[in-house]
Image: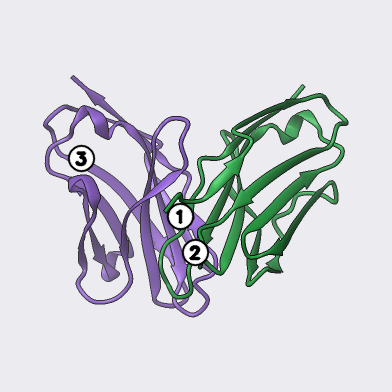
Chain colours: A purple, B green
Amino acid sequence: AQSVTQLGSHVSVSEGALVLLRCNYSSSVPPYLFWYVQYPNQGLQLLLKYTTGATLVKGINGFEAEFKKSETSVHLTKPSAHMSDAAEYFCAVSDMAGANNLFFGTGTRLTVIP
Amino acid sequence: DAGVIQSPRHEVTEMGQEVTLRCKPISGHNSLFWYRQTMMRGLELLIYFNNNVPIDDSGMPEDRFSAKMPNASFSTLKIQPSEPRDSAVYFCASRPVGLDGYTFGSGTRLTVV
């Protein structure tokens, strides 16, 4: 069975500071991992995805994530936070075999302090 | 590409009334998903279709909920009768063949009073 755990429902950072959003996954098969962002009153938008290959994945808006199999983690980072990064971020996992269903974490709300 | 289109964006209805939510997936995407988002339960998968066929509806909360996909370009989620606890944002998402991520619509915010 697949599941994800996002550590911290709320994260606050100062503008220009490092953003680190944590996600650990559980999967019985090699997983495909995704990060989505949701801005207020909007749907979810794909930030990045890890399928196979390079473990450091670059996404949109300057975000990247490193897949660490030994730690079963795929934490999301951005070197310098911008006010426009304030949003809710969701980690999701699907299994390679089926890949028909995404299992979402409960989300982390990022606040950027000017 | 217009993306996944959902309608209406907002719906306010009285308890007991029938509600129909609509979704137009991206052309060429063969999988369609209905999700519900609430503060308490987060994002929940209600049902998904592959090639217009319902594959897994185990997330549909009750018999009051039903979903159809009569063709590749249209799907509906119906709640009859609606209850206040159905108040949530309902998202539709579609995905192409293969292992790519989903594309979500902007959602329908349903309020049942």
Q: Residue at x 84, y 27 (%)?
A: B15
**Labels 3, 1: one chain:** no
Q: Are marks 1 and 2 in contact (CB under 8 Å)?
A: yes
Task: Provide residue B55's location: percent of width, then percent of height.
Answer: 68, 70
Per the image, the residue denoted by label 2 is B95
Q: Is residue A111 above or below residue B105?
A: above
Cα–Cα span, label 3 and label 1: 25 Å
Q: Nearer the viewer, mark 2 or mark 3?
A: 2
Task: Provide residue B107's location: percent of width, then percent of height.
Answer: 56, 40
Per the image, the residue denoted by label 3 is A19
Q: Earlier in the sequence, mark 1 or mark 2?
A: 2
Q: Residue at x 23, y 76 (%)?
A: A53
Query: Circle 1 sits in a helix, a strand or a loop, which is it?
Result: strand
Query: Circle 2 sits in a helix, a strand or a loop, which is it?
Result: strand
| Chain for disc number 1 | B
Q: Is residue B70 left or right of residue A76?
A: right
Q: Quadrant of residue A92?
A: bottom left
Nearer the observer, B49 or B64 = B49
Per the image, the residue denoted by label 1 is B103
Q: Residues within 10 Å of mark 2 (few under 14, many from 20)?
A: many
| Chain for disc number 3 | A
**Which quadrant is home to the C terminus of chain A?**
top left
Nearer the observer, A113 or B69 = B69
Q: Amino acid at mark 1?
A: Thr
Query: Circle 3 sits in a helix, a strand or a loop, which is it?
Result: strand
| Chain for disc number 2 | B
Task: Provide residue B87's location: percent of width, then percent of height.
Answer: 69, 31
Q: Nearer the viewer, mark 3 or mark 1?
A: 1
Q: Is residue A99 above or below residue A20?
A: below
